[in-house]
Amino acid sequence: MKQQVHEYIIIGSGASGSIIAHELTKAGADVLMLEAGKRFSAATFPDNELDANAQLMWNGGMDASADASTLFIRGKAVGGGTIINQCLLDRFDAMALDSWREKSGLPFFNSHDLATHYDAVESNLSLHHMEERDWNTNARLYVKGFEQKGFGWAPLRRGQSNCGTGNDCMTCLGGCPRSSKQSMLETFLPKAEAQGLKIQSEFLVREVIHGPHLVSIAGYHKNVATTLYAKKVILASGALGTTELLLRSRLQDRLPALGKGFYCHPQWMTIALFDELIDSHKGAFQTVKSDEPRFRKAGFKLENVFAGPIAIGLLKPGYGFEHQRFMRRYRNMACIEVAVRDQDPGTISLNKRDRLTINKPLSDVDRQKAENGNQLVADMFHDIGANEVMTSPLQIGLHLMGGCAIGNDERTSVVNEAFQVHGMNNLYIADSSVFPDAPGINPSLTIMALSHQAAASILRQNSMQSATSKPTREAVL
Ligand SMILES: Cc1cc2nc3c(=O)[nH]c(=O)nc-3n(C[C@H](O)[C@H](O)[C@H](O)COP(=O)(O)OP(=O)(O)OC[C@H]3O[C@@H](n4cnc5c(N)ncnc54)[C@H](O)[C@@H]3O)c2cc1C
């Protein structure tokens, strides 16, 4: 039986996979993308918070660490995490890149070398700083608190085209019905499809088998067992997804660093109740961030933030009347998040029942950073007149990073400087799993920049290979 062999298969359609698909198809390559989640569009995103959580997130947004102390949220849809994220797009600073260079031993982690890739990605995105006249009251209170304390702040850079002013669509975290948020579905994927990319959604990959000429992929397409073949495979399933796939493919003996070095920028929300209406749900949920060297050094950052009523309800401990009293004041709430640059990593593994297991206890050092940040936010809210302040005990991980670190030492990394899995020339990774540590900065723009760099490296290597051997589009299996 003749079975088609694709030139490239990309597993995962988020920040990393979409950029690589765009670059490879631009060069004329044959690319198939597989995605476990469904495909939605601006017209078909779920129209309520409950359905959005259930349909756009792995396990309904309820993945937890082994000790249940941290909730991890990750996207499961064509577009990956970019469908449910806030699309705040920052470049890394020297502090983050110096640390990566030191940990990985790779000299290209510096702002000069990465600038080409950041520039290329940014040129395809609409980026926006909210004008002060468009801020909501939550953002204004944040800046008031910061200025009263003498802390530095800056506007967040948002990937958006036109969010309008004062709207209360509230749906950034559940897809964007306005086609404004610069998710992969609005930016790189349509361009890649116009260049020939094929996408199979609802394809859950379970295993990859690497051979010297081919990689086979086993999984389920709409619950039907399916095997596909490609000359080259790019894993772009995110920190948890990519690491899980390599673990399921039984590669831990060949890759001693697999599953190690997992980081998540653990974060906490503090909600303050004011007498006046704040209406944090109107307009952009996130507008301003800390720009304070003392916080950067201390290992945390602050942003104004808000969410729909279900998410806010989850943040408040307790039951019954007390919970009801709190939630009745939804329109009086202001909110700030503290995200910690975690220095002590966790691990990703499969347990005896073959289930994904994430061990990420918070070390004393990281806990202290959180306490310092949360105390500062509580003080700030009291100073500007809040009559009640609640720091939620719920610990959340949204920036999931590591598990397949990049580096030049096979004992401490999984991927080499050409983004190939060590010892497996036909398998590449450039997604959030390759992060050598937690940068303490919103990660997705850098995931895209690294993926842009990886695509160039893949094309270079393959043009060198095809100069020495003539590839065939089909193989007899
Ligand atoms: C609520 C929220 C808000 C966030 N806000 C921001 C922000 O403002 N700025 C920022 O920089 N970052 C933000 N992030 C983080 C950011 O979205 C992620 O870091 C980024 O999307 C990760 O990119 P990735 O390509 O590594 O993986 P993803 O974007 O997660 O893509 C991986 C894809 O692979 C698919 N997949 C996984 N396993 C398999 C499998 N076995 N078979 C087939 N497909 C599979 C997944 O379904 C997913 O679609 C936020 C995240 C969340 C959850």
Image (cartoon, grey):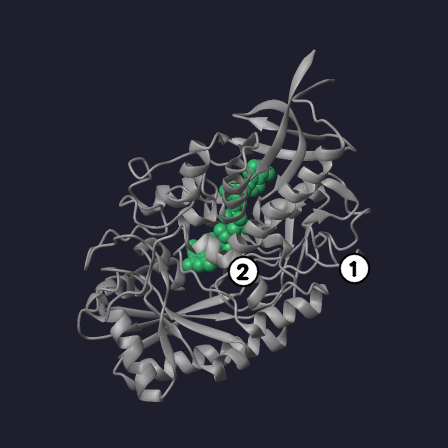
Q: Quadrant of the C terminus?
A: top right
Three-letter code for the amino acid on which mark 2 is drawn? Thr
For image coordinates 38% across by 82% down, the residue present is: 152
Q: Position of residue 409 (x, y in %)?
A: 79, 59
Mark 2 element type: strand
Q: Quadrant of residue 154?
A: bottom left
Q: Position of residue 361 (x, y in %)?
A: 62, 65
Mark 1 element type: loop
**Left or right of residue 93: residue 390:** left
Q: Quadrant of the N terminus?
A: top right
Res 69 seen here: no
Q: Quadrant of residue 383?
A: bottom left
Q: Position of residue 66 (x, y in %)?
A: 62, 55
Res 291 seen here: yes
Q: Nearer the viewer, mark 2 or mark 1?
A: 1
Residue 34 vs residue 19, the one in the foreground: 19
> Farthest residue toward the front?
467
Residue bearing mark 2: 70
Residue 386 vs residue 244, the one in the foreground: 244
Decide: few, some or many residues near mark 2? Use Cα within 10 Å; few <14, some 14-19, many ≥20.
many
Q: Position of residue 71 (x, y in %)?
A: 51, 57
**Left or right of residue 324: residue 405:** right
Task: Indicate if the residue with disc 2 has its beta carbon within 8 Å of ligand 1.
Answer: no
Residue bearing mark 1: 409
Gap between marks 2 and 1, in whole Å?
31 Å
